[in-house]
Image: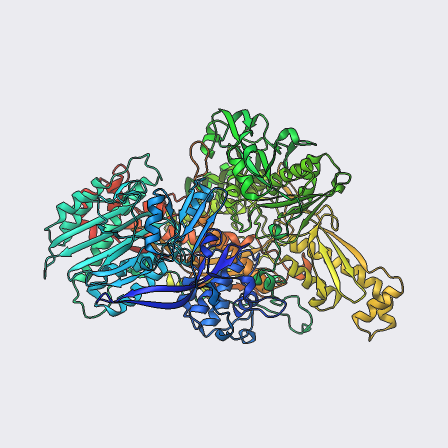
Amino acid sequence: MTQMMITVTKSLLLLYYYNNLFSVSLANEMTLIYSFSHHTANACLFPVCALHHVAVTTVEGIGNTKSRLHPAQERIAKSHGSQCGFCTPGIVMSMYTLLRNKPEPKMEDIEDAFQGNLCRCTGYRPILEGYRTFAKVMMSSSLFNSSEFQPLDPTQEPIFPPELMQKQLCFKGERVMWIQPTTLKELVALKSQYPNAKLVVGNTEVGIEMRLKNMLYPVIIAPAWISEMNAVQHTETGVTFGAACTLSSVEEVLRKVVAELPPYKAEVFQAVLEQLRWFAGPQIRNVAVSSFTHIIGKRTITMDEKFFTGYRKTIVKPEEILLSVEIPYSKKGEYFSAFKQASRREDDIAIVTCGMRVLFQDGTNRVEEIKLSYGGMAPTTVLALKTCKELTGRDWNEKLLQDACRLLAGEMDLSPSAPGGMVDFRRTLTLSFFFKFYLTVLQKLSKNYNGTVSAAREGRFGEGGPVCAVLVGRVQIQAEGQAVEDMVGRPLMHVSAAKQACGEAVYCDDIPHYENELYLTLVTSTKAHAKILSVDASEAQSVPGFVCFVSAKDVPGSNITGIANDETVFAEDVVTCVGHIIGAVLADTQEHSRRAAKVVKIKYEELKPIVTIQEAIEKQSFLKSIKRINKGDVKKGFEESDHILEGEMYLGGQEHFYLETHCTLAVPKGEDGEMELFVSTQNPMKTQEFAANALGVPSNRIVVRVKRMGGGFGGKETRNTILTTAVAVAAFKTGRPVRCMLDRDEDMLISGGRHPFLGRYKVGFMKNGKVKSLEVSYYGNGGNSVDLSYGVMDRALLHLDNSYNIPNVSSVGIVCKTNLPSNTAFRGFGGPQGMMIAECWMSDLARKCGLPPEEVRKLNLYHEGDLTHFNQKLEGFTLRRCWDECLSSSSYHVFWSCLAGALVHVYTDGSVLLTHGGTEMGQGLHTKMIQVASRSLGIPTSNIYISETSTNTVPNTSPTAASVSADINGMAVHNACQTILKRLEPIKQSNPKGSWEDWIKAAYENCVSLSATGFYRIPDLGYDFEKNEGKPFCYFSYGVACSEVEIDCLTGDHKNIRTDIVMDVGTSLNPAIDIGQIEGAFVQGLGLFTMEELRYSPEGNLYTRGPGMYKIPAFGDIPTEFYVSLLRDCPNSKAVYSSKAVGEPPLFLSASVFYAIKDAIYSARKDSGLTEPFRLDSPATPERIRNACVDIFTKMVTPSEGLGNGFENLHKLLTIRPSARARHSL
């Protein structure tokens, strides 16, 4: 049986299956094997009907906070591996499943188990470090004590219920009938009766089609339990798998076969295993099936060039049933390799993939047969038939290589407008893959097989994710002489970590349903810019459960909303982006509301959209406020410079990809317009204000409650209001509770993200690299409304220097108005964009000077007491200390010659209920506030509790953003605590030896108030752009990172080998949380600068919607070695208990990876004689890396770029550098 993990609310399950696999020997004697197995699966895809007679274990079923945590839950919590917690149940269940199958796993097993899991908060290091303890790896950590972990006892796990060993089912729903036959005879009869029925085993494709592509299959047949279709047969020619065998079972069988066979017979198996490693995650492989050679009834079909008849169409007839697939043994003299290139190595769809096979004449290197097949070069898999024909009968030598590349360049052609884009990159990959294959075969031909396994792995790039040597560097845990009970500065576990690991933590959509509750689905524009001619919801009324359609005419107050009052709750006459909210459908269930929303018909008159920054510049489509910062005499600076460098850089946007999408539950109270809003938001105040404005009631009638968020990163600072106001209006209209949680693709479509930027610069500098003058223009893509774009651009201008002293500066920041969803706050808030462009010109001028980049950077760093370009004096400047420590710890030179409030209630038993204006989104703010209150009051943290953030306890709060929440809320909490202590002074003096509980009881009896509010605002902040004077920041944070990468020059892949970070966080309130924030920010920045790419059509449609197309970093993308140190002895007098902000500043340190990649590309380009600075836009995707590594192959597919057409240099093929490595610090 298979065990799958399901966490219904967090999207993973554990299924426990009873297996009746047939194993067939060579003699065709069939033996029935009964076994039990455990597998993870995605709850959002696996059909409930398919769980018939399957034991399902969810995260709630393995442990809880009331009795005991399971070791898998305990270790992720205590090792600080849970921040927002939304992904934690899925990760716990991945680990739990592994432990059920392998109670003593290796570290490699642990990493493989997490291939299908994503986390946006932690940076993965603490998860791996905590779970490493199951692998018995020797390690120590200053952040947790592994000796406190309870041991794993496999005997205490639940057994498979014997009553589930029967399997038959027919289920009829409203629109779909699900049939689960038990015999092959039943299946054949059903397929004859329903020839167009869809056969489903894992639902990994059909589930997505029905959920996201609006496809409907009235009859689904599930043959997963048919014995013959689960059979595995070992024959004289190969291994045959039943068509219902999952990819995981195929992988398991092939590993055993490879271990037993002579290497020459396992060539194909090795290649299949290598590709399975990168095919989806285990949750998909555990249920998905595949096919190779098909045996259909009495008909055998070979997968050749005739197999595919069109896109997703084959020669298999509708009435036929796939019974089995056969993978053949390879022969002596036969070699096989498979390659895949994707945006992300783990769990990603291929950009180009290929399988290559060659058979040599016995005892020679002469080609007898050769097959080269490619995916991603046409609607179907294509074979390079012409090339193969030409190569047959040829010797395997350099001349064959030259001719093969020339032939493939002609045969594997693509139209410039080919679907999927990346035309040059895809064409180049076809040549690069063959070159890799040629080298692999050449190497094998030069050796005699002597029992060693022939692997298709090539250095680091075939070795998978890192077995992470992720260790925390130096951490100052506590001050000398600090009292044991004083928890400030100690690595206190996140206060919700245990609940999150058990699935007990309540998020917005976990709130139990109210009686008569309705579900809302948004109806959004499909056009980027158009007039609305009509909206017809009549067809929606026929959907079962439909209640009503809500639009602008139903808004009782003002339909105008937004930070700058330039948005609408519902569009009325014009839509200005794809995803613009036009209306909403209300129904009794989520499924019914979605079905009804899909049939609402809207007619448009299309207008010309503006999508890109370049288009906005051409049409002068700018928002009104244009900011400038000028300092010194720029013209004179250029005149005094030895060199002047001009250039530009583009930085793409970024999707927040918080694991919990936008969610709101609105509950009308029935009196005086009162309404309670449960919202996933960073900004309760604006949420309250906008909802009240839309409803036409005072703010005192609206209460906004935030328990916790499953991530935010700035995306829930203002953009949650576009959903919340719509839900509030719907609840007002119906008088019933209304709920809505967006799907991932909906969320990505409507909510906006990080601002794309274009930077144009002109920099003057001396021969030694000293910068004299800078002229820079920033253009940001603001989208269709102002939102927070002005603030983002302000921050970019204030960070244009990064950490460099530039005597003469002329800068301008312009926000472009386009027809994209309004972009908004994102961790860093414009700072990363401003600093990234600074590092671009700094990197290029170092190359221009012919000097090491780290020397030029250090030469230009600020010193203590310097004035920034916005004329603020640098005090407590620790950056040079960070720089020296980071370069020392990384052995760099060895390798390379505002406003906040709080409310404190003390109850008569001495317990404290603490409320403050900040919201918890995983950053540990509540934990830190409890630590602050604990020290302030002098009581244990166990006495203090934070329930939620709400507008009826702490009003008019600042949003939880800009990394200042711990600073301002911490001071407000401290002030409130001091008020309580002052009231207690007379009582303490009268009973100095009394306990806290004694004092509180006495205070109550003496009618002393035990409730106090606290308030704090950052003093003396303000800046005037016109005068270039003032103080925009209270203090500065400093950090340095050094990263080492290796790039695959042939494919554009890169590996993050090592990163060292030294960060000044003042005196840390909680080093475990601060290090988690540093690592999480770094990995999020890793996605921004190297992986995450938003692609739009010219019409403004987002191509990269959902996790299938948009890739964030996974476990295997973090550096193999990841060291983080907190700078010691650097207290900050301007924040609570000498701490510093830590949420946003570390994100930019991941730019060290980007510029290490650029250095490695520069090294590779030198082989082609290119030594001048070159442009590399962000993110540094495989496409950009490969195209920048100009070589013979790139010249063959783009002869107009580079030197010559490449063909005259084919004799240089074997001198191509396959990889390059570089380090970079900043």
Measured from the top left, where is residue 156 in percent x and y?
Answer: 52, 73
Horizontal relation, residue 456 to residue 865: left or right: left
Q: Is residue 263 visible?
A: yes
Residue at the spot 14% in from the left edge and 50% down from the top edge: 400
Front residue of 669 and 1141: 669
Above or below, 527 against 850 in this view is above
Q: Quadrant of residue 566?
A: top right
Quarter of image, res 237 = bottom left
Q: How many marks?
A: 0
Q: Residue furthest right?
A: 1006
Q: Residue at x 29, y 60 (%)?
A: 457
Quarter of the picture holding the N terminus: bottom left
Residue toward you, 890 or 544: 544
Measuring from the top left, give residue 375's x and y in whole percent. 29, 46
Q: How is the image coloured?
A: rainbow
Left or right, 1121 with reference to 122: left
Give the answer, above or below, for where 641 lies relative to 548: below
x then y, percent, for residue 664: 62, 45
Q: Quadrant of residue 166?
A: bottom left
Pinpoint residue 1025: horizontal percent, then vertical percent. 62, 38
Could you tell me if residue 1105 is visible in this image? no
